Image: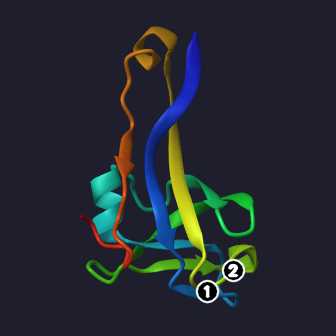
Amino acid sequence: MYIEVLQSKIHNVKITQTELNYTGSITIDMDLVDAAGMIPNQKVLIVNNNNGERFETYIIEGERGTGIIGLNGAAARKGQVGDHLIIMTFISIEINEAKQYKPTNLFPDSKNNLV
């Protein structure tokens, strides 16, 4: 039997920009994407700690070292610049493997940089 478990989490990053007139997604600094073991175009679940919104979208590459976290398209309506987000990915694995699996958890600094 397979079960879905947390693969990785980028915890408490701040939205740095919103762009309503875009086709959709979340732009994430590639330093964070790589460190979390995520990849561009991967589906993510996002939680906005400021307003309680939970939504899914996909990752697009953000410039390295910028700390960019940008909500694009309809997702731009789910938060404001300065809101704090948790960005999560999940994997489906065998239940016995899941019992021992350790997700990657990132805790960037206040400027969305790796510490």
Q: Residue at x 69, y 76 (%)?
A: 79
Give the position of the C terminus as an image quadrant: bottom left
Classify 7 as above or below 47.
Answer: above
**Are discs 1 and 2 less than 8 Å apart at CB?**
yes
Classify 73 as above or below 45.
Answer: below
Q: Which residue is mark 2?
A: 76
Q: Residue at x 32, y 69 (%)?
A: 30
The disc labelled 1 sits on which kind of residue? Thr
Residue 58: which quarter of the image?
Answer: bottom right
Locate residue 73, reporting x and y percent.
69, 80
Q: Secondary structure at mark 2?
A: helix
Earlier residue among tags 1 and 2: 1
Q: Residue at x 39, y 56 (%)?
A: 39
Who is closer to the viewer here, 84 or 35?
84
Classify 7 as above or below 39.
Answer: above
Check residue 28 in the rendering and tell me which mark sits there, or answer none.
none
Q: Secondary structure at mark 1?
A: strand
* Real-space CA distance between mark 1 and mark 2, rounded to the nearest whole angstrom: 5 Å
Locate residue 18, reporting x and y percent.
61, 86
Q: Is residue 77 left or right of residue 94?
A: right
The disc labelled 2 sits on which kind of residue? Ala
Locate residue 82, reporting x and y percent.
56, 82
Locate residue 22, reporting x and y percent.
64, 85
Pointer 2 local density, CA inside 10 Å: few below 14, some 14–19, many at least 20:
many
Who is closer to the viewer here, 8 or 48?
48
Check residue 18 in the rendering and tell me which mark sits there, or answer none.
1
Give the position of the N terminus as an image quadrant: top right
Q: Residue at x 62, y 58 (%)?
A: 46
Who is closer to the viewer here, 48 or 94?
48
